[in-house]
Amino acid sequence: MMTWRHVTPDDFPLLARWLAAPHVARWWHHETSMEAVARDFGPSARREEPNEDLLAFLDGAPLGLLQRSFLHDYPEYLHELTPLTAVPPRAMTIDYLIGDAADVGRGIGTRLIRSALDQLWADHRDAECVIVAVHADNVGSWRVLEKAGLRRVAEGELDPDNPIDDRRHYVYRLDRPREP
């Protein structure tokens, strides 16, 4: 069973380890010192920032990280994204990782994204859709989004997370499911 909880400062050593793992570091390109992790994840852990950092647990064991936010809370990113696709006022975005390389390529990523979206819809009743930009070369990530039901709505240039990458990105979207 997949469960979720907000990141706390006690989770920073785990996040540092995950961010340093080669399969994560390639795409996240994040500093992994404890100071850097505390600097970058601390405001969310203390609920001082509009984004939410959540840990995913599979059968009680830590599995991965989900970041989610309303796009309007980050105007610079919104400004970069809107030339590629329409962004409704209550659109959200997610970013995600699986911490242990042994869990990659086993279908767990698709389960993680499906569960993350179910949780997002439950927690944010006003969210209209989820829009996710993924680097074009990150095939594993965009395939997981497709398997989880998101559809590619745009291609274009965005600033990459890792400076070794070019600007090619695919943009995916999933609208809020209709209530019965």
Image (cartoon, rainbow, N blue to C red):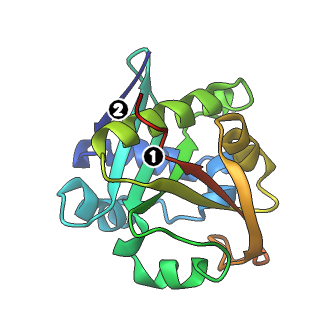
Q: Residue at x 58, y 83 (%)?
A: 80
Q: Is residue 35 visible?
A: yes
Helix, strand or loop status at disc 2: strand
> On the picture, is 127 further left or further right than 151?
left
What amino acid is found at the position of numbered circle 2 in the picture? Trp
- Give how far across and how far down residue 149 sits, in percent: 65, 38
Helix, strand or loop status at disc 1: strand
- Give how far across and how far down residue 115 sits, in percent: 48, 30
Up-down: is 41 above or below 114? below
> On the picture, is 164 further left or further right than 173?
right
- Quadrant assignment for the N terminus: top left
- Quadrant assignment for the C terminus: top left
Mark 2 or 1, nearer chain start: 2
Query: Marks 1 and 2: in contact by CB < 8 Å?
Result: yes
Q: Which residue is mark 2?
A: 4
Q: Residue at x 27, y 59 (%)?
A: 44
Q: Which residue is mark 1?
A: 66
What amino acid is found at the position of numbered circle 1 in the picture? Leu
Q: Is residue 164 visible?
A: no
Q: Nearer the viewer, residue 67 or 73?
A: 73
- Give how far across and how far down residue 166 sits, in percent: 79, 77
Up-down: is 103 above or below 30? above
Q: Residue at x 82, y 59 (%)?
A: 137
Up-down: is 143 above or below 34? above
- Crowding around mark 1 (Cα neighbors within 10 Å: few <14, some 14 to 19, many 20+) is many
Q: Residue at x 64, y 35 (%)?
A: 148
C-alpha distance separating marks 2 and 1: 9 Å
> On the picture, is 108 further left or further right than 30?
right
The disc placed on residue 19 is none
Quarter-wise, where is residue 2 in the image?
Answer: top left
Q: Nearer the viewer, residue 29 or 48?
A: 48
